[in-house]
Image (cartoon, helix red, strand yellow):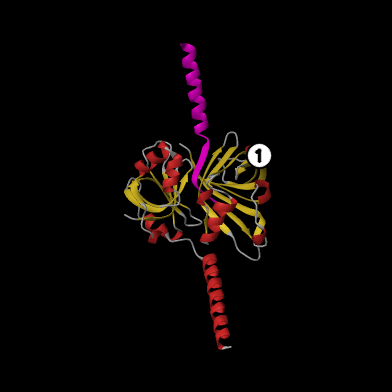
Amino acid sequence: MKKQWKILLVLLMIVLAAAGYGLYLFNAKPADVRTIEADYSLSATNLMDDFNKDEAAANLKYLNKVISVKGKVSDIKLEQSTGQATIILDSGDPIASITCSFYADEAGSVKQIKEGEEIVVKGKCTGKLTDIILNKCSIEK
Amino acid sequence: MKKIFLIITAFLLVHISFSQKRYYTKTGAISIEAGTALEDIDAINNSTTSVLDVATGQYEFAMLVNGFEFKRALMQEHFNENYMESDKYPKSVFKGKITNINEVNFNKNGTYRVVVKGTLEMHGVKKEIQTPGIIKINDQDISATADFILVLDDYQIAIPGLVKDKISKTAKIKVTCNYSVLK
C-alpha cells in the first residue's frame, strides 16, 4: 500500500514537472540579444560583401545569429510616436546599407550617436531585403 | 548620334522628374494581430521598406517575414517555421496604387483619406487587396496609416486543429509609415 502511494506521488511529480516545463516553454520570452555573445564580429562592408556574393550561403551563415557589425553611421531615425530607434550603417554598396533596428529602451543611447560616427552595433540578423536588417540592436561601442 | 543624345537627355529628364516626387522609408512599422480571446498573439516588424511615387500614386512595400518580433519565443518559431515558412518565402511584397492620389495635395498640410489597391504577395501566394488608409501631411513630415484584415486561408496558411481555437482565422494588419524625400 505504502509503495503504491510512493509510485503515485512520483508520477504526480513527473506530470507536474512536465506541465510546468510546458508552461515555461510556452511563456518563454525571446532571448535578450544584449546578453548573448556575438557569433560573428565583422565590418559592415564585409557583411554586405558576403550577402552580395552568395545570398543563400550568407543566410545559412548569419540568419537569426547574433552579430557585431562595425560601420559608419549614415542615418539615424527616431520615431516620435513609438520611440523606436533605427541606425543605418554605410556598407560601401551605394544602394544597400545595414538597417539596425534597436530595442525600444535603447533609444536613449542611440540619441548620443551622431551621423558619420564609426560605431559597433550588436543585433540579430533577420536577412536581406535591399538592406541587410538587424533586429534587437544595441550599441557595443 | 544626335538621336542617341536626344534619347539619353529624354531619359535623364524623365528620371529626374520621377526621383523628385518619391517618398521612402526603411523603418515602416507593420504589426499583426491574430489572437483570440484564449490567447494574445501579436508581432511587429519595424524595418519595412516602402516607396510612394506622388506623381502616379504607385505604392510599394517590402518586408522580411523573419523580421517580425513576438513576445513569446515559441510563437515566433511557429510563425516562421510552420505558418509563414520564412526560409522558403523570406519576403512579403505589396505592389499597388493609391487610386485617388489626385485628391492628395502634398503641398498642403492636412489629413487625406485614400484608397490603396494592389497585389500582396505573401507565403508564395499573390492576391489582390484593397484597403482605406490615411495620409497625413505636416510640412516635411508625411505619414501613412492603414488597418485591414487578411484571411489566412487566402494565403494557404493552415492552422492545425490542436490550436485552432487559439489562433484567429484572420489577421489584423496595422501599417504605420513615416516618409522622407527620396533623393
Residue B139 image point, x, y percent? 51, 45
Can residue B34 be seen here? The reply is: yes
Depth check: give the residue in front, B36 or A36. A36
Can residue A132 be seen here? The reply is: no
Query: What residue appears at the point 61 percent right and 57 percent down from the top-left corner?
Result: B33
Q: Which residues are magenta?
A: B1-30
Label 1 resides on the chain identified as B
What residue is shown with label 1?
Answer: B100
Query: What residue appears at the point 34 percent right and 55 percent down from the top-left corner?
Result: A140
Task: Determine whether the residue tagged by mark 1 lies in a helix, strand or loop.
Answer: loop
Residue A138 located left or right of residue B103:
left
Query: What residue appears at the point 49 percent right and 64 percent down from the top-left corner?
Result: A29
Give the residue type that dot 1 points to: Asn
Residue furthest to the bottom: A2
Would you place residue B4 above or below residue A141 in this image? above
- Residue B109: in magenta span: no
Mainly helix, strand or loop, the magenta region?
helix
Residue A58 located left or right of residue A71:
right
Residue B113 located left or right of residue B71:
right
Depth check: give the residue in front, B58 or A103. A103
Residue B66 image point, x, y percent? 51, 50
Residue B5 image point, x, y percent? 46, 16
Depth check: give the residue in front, A58 or A128. A58
Q: Quadrant of the C terminus of chain B?
A: top left
